């Protein structure tokens, strides 16, 4: 029996109460990584185990466990792999991490050769954002390389393996281990020389990676480690544009500044790098990264979990074929404007300039001028009587906007432009804390009621879009109750309906202003707790044991005339739900829905299942719901910009 198989058997025995160890999926001389599956909810994870022959070395064990604690300290960032648990059992030392189904950047480069400048900026921006989070917590990666940057199946970047990371407060006996450890191609000059290493060393490695992504080759190569190390110390690589002429000057500037030999000449923080890259990324159109998904997990996904009764398992995947979910547009990357001329020495990235208007023909210009003159003469004749001048209205003042408009799918009420008081200062008041603040919003319209079954049926009849399933206890709900809110719809269903109706989903901020008015009230009707006349909540006091018609409670009205913004159904919004403790929501959801996706949007207002004293009913409270799930307490209403 091989050592790998022996460790797998020992690991399986150590974690058998919660996990089923499936197979070895990678690792090196210091540790092996095994694919495992939770026995209850079926979620996949990766378990990293210290090599058996190293387990008797106290220093190496201490280093490995320090690595695990370091990784766990970085909890909460979407671009850093999450550590679920750390343990020592049966003579084994291991940490349990989320399994990231996808492809590392090293493999991706092998297949593609190089990335476009915009793809490069998008990837490096996400890595810089992750590093900023780690550096703020005193953690330096120290082994950043393409193999440790993974694209998940949605195309998002996840930084892996803070394996030789150093925590600032860690005693020197541990931090000195591996002072010159790292992959030679990506090591900073100070790291090679054994000098003190800080966050700027990670930024140097980030520059090497960025250079490789955009040009298709590393800035320094050599026949052996010493040749590569010497190049890092003494050689200036060719400017990226010599190998990639399509690279814009701002991105070239960022890469060259990251590659400065002297740490003092580099960027001084990952946050600064992320800020510059974000400006580049936001200047253009969306790009798509498509990782190659291995087939090894498909077998396990199709195999029932050992020791439980349900047959369907999963982690972040839907039960639909994987190929439908393997290509994702990464927002909000985009088009590069024509790169400005480079200067010497290298200057900071110039601001993105809007494209100049296209030149019009002389005839068009002349005709336009003649029309303007004629309009002016006509105006002078009609308005010859002197009138007092009226200044232009300030922004967001609502001029001649009707307070209601009728649409084929129902009445919409105006929410005037101006200030909106959002949030609350009590952190416990919301599942996703919404800090109290005042912002300015332009005018918009919002549906007076939730979208009804009748309106959704019109959408179905016009487009053929599938009808939702009825509530379990009311099989005739959709057909027999046209004036009740449509439920059992997904986020994608709601977006499709809104597009057909010429509307959109409201943002978090718009929904909250529509519910609270401009005075920051606690509930749509005021500050008093909900009574039976205000909200359809848990219990029968309001006259509705379950769902209620969309116009059932006129006293639920908000300051702008919208009904049922508390209770009845949770309402989907256009705003992504991604609080710092998002993983807790995802874990909890997957206990009941193993296939819940990682893409969630905010839901607002509570439902008929919410107790009357639940903070969910308060308009500043925000919760979330997976985009791919439907339920009988999920509904929505639409918003629309004034014409």
Image: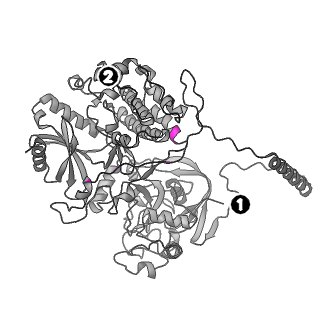
Q: Which residue range is magenta in the image?
A: 279-295
- The percent position of residue 518, horizontal first and vertical second, equals 57, 54
Q: Is residue 216 above or below residue 487?
A: above
Residue at the (36%, 32%) spot, across then down: 135
The mark that comes first in sequence, 2 or 1, is 2
Q: Is residue 140 magenta?
A: no
Q: Nearer the viewer, residue 373 or 116?
A: 116
Query: Colour scheme used in the picture?
Result: one colour
The residue wearing badge 1 is 400
Classed neighbour count for the residue bearing mark 2: other residues with Cα under 10 Å, few (<14), some (14–19), many (≥20)? many
Residue 191 badge: 2
Foreground disc of the pair 2, 1: 2
From the image, give the main secondary structure of the stretch colored magenta: loop
Q: Is residue 35 above or below residue 481?
A: above
Q: Secondary structure at mark 1?
A: loop
Q: Quarter of the image holding residue 354?
A: top right
Residue at the (25%, 64%) spot, across then down: 312
Q: Is residue 193 above or below residue 515?
A: above
Left or right of residue 618, residue 302 in this image: left
Left or right of residue 247, residue 15 in this image: left
Q: Is residue 603 visible?
A: yes
- The percent position of residue 62, horizontal first and vertical second, equals 17, 31
- Looking at the image, do the residues carrying marks 2 and 1 touch, with CB atoms under 8 Å apart? no
Q: Is residue 291 magenta?
A: yes
């Amino acid at each position: 029996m091989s050592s790998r198989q022996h460790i797998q058997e020992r690991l399986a025995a150590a974690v058998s109460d919660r996990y089923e160890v499936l197979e070895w999926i990678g690792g090196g001389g210091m540790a092996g990584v095994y694919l495992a599956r939770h026995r209850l909810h079926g979620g996949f994870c990766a378990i990293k185990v210290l090599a058996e022959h190293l387990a008797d070395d106290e220093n190496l064990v201490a280093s490995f466990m320090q690595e695990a604690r370091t990784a766990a300290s970085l909890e909460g960032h979407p671009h850093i792999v999450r550590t679920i648990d750390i343990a020592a059992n049966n003579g084994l030392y291991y940490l349990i991490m989320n399994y990231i189904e996808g492809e590392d950047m090293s493999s991706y480069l092998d297949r593609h050769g190089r990335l476009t400048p915009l793809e490069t900026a998008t990837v490096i921006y996400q890595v810089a954002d992750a590093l900023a989070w780690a550096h703020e917590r005193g953690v330096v990666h120290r082994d950043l390389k393409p193999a440790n940057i993974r694209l998940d199946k949605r195309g998002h970047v996840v930084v892996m393996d803070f394996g030789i990371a150093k925590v600032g407060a860690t005693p020197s006996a541990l931090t000195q281990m591996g002072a010159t450890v790292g992959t030679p191609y990506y090591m900073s000059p100070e790291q090679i020389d054994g000098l003190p290493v800080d966050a700027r060393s990670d930024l140097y490695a980030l520059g090497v990676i960025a250079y490789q992504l955009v040009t298709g080759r590393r800035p320094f190569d050599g026949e052996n480690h010493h040749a590569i190390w010497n190049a890092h110390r003494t050689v200036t690589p060719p400017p990226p544009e010599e190998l990639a002429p399509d690279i814009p000057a701002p991105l070239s500037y960022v890469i060259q500044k990251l590659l400065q030999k002297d740490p003092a000449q580099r960027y001084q923080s990952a946050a600064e790098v992320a800020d510059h890259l974000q400006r580049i990324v936001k200047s253009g159109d969306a790009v798509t990264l498509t990782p190659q998904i291995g087939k090894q997990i498909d077998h396990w996904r199709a195999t029932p979990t050992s020791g439980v009764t349900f047959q369907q398992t999963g982690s972040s995947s839907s039960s639909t074929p994987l190929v439908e979910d393997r290509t994702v547009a990464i927002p909000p990357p985009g088009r590069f404007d024509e790169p400005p001329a480079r200067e010497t020495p290298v200057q900071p990235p110039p601001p993105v300039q809007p494209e100049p208007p296209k030149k019009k023909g002389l005839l068009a210009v002349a005709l336009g001028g003649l029309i303007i003159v004629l309009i002016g003469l006509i105006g002078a004749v009609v308005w010859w009587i002197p009138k007092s001048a009226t200044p232009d209205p300030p922004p967001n003042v609502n001029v001649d906007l009707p307070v209601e408009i009728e649409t084929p799918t129902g009445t919409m009420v105006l929410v005037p432009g101006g200030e909106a008081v959002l949030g609350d200062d009590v952190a416990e008041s919301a599942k996703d804390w919404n800090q109290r603040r005042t912002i300015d919003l332009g005018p918009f319209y919002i549906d007076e009621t939730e979208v009804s079954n009748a309106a959704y049926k019109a959408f179905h009849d016009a487009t053929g879009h599938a009808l939702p399933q009825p509530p379990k206890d009311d099989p005739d709900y959709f057909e027999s109750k046209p004036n009740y809110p449509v439920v059992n719809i997904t986020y994608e269903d709601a977006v499709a309906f809104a597009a057909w109706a010429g509307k959109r989903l409201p943002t978090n901020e718009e929904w909250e202003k529509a519910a609270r008015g401009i005075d920051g009230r606690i509930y749509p009707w005021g500050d008093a707790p909900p009574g039976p006349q205000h909200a359809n909540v848990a219990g029968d006091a309001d006259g509705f044991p379950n769902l209620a018609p969309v116009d059932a409670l006129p006293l639920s009205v908000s300051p702008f005339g919208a009904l049922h913004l508390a209770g009845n159904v949770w309402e989907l919004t256009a705003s992504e739900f991604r609080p710092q403790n998002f993983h807790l929501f995802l874990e909890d959801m997957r206990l009941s829905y193993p296939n819940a996706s990682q893409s969630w949007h905010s839901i607002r207002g509570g439902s008929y299942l919410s107790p009357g004293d639940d903070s969910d009913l308060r308009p500043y409270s925000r919760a979330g719901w997976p985009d791919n799930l439907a339920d009988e307490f999920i509904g929505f209403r639409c918003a629309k910009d004034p014409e």
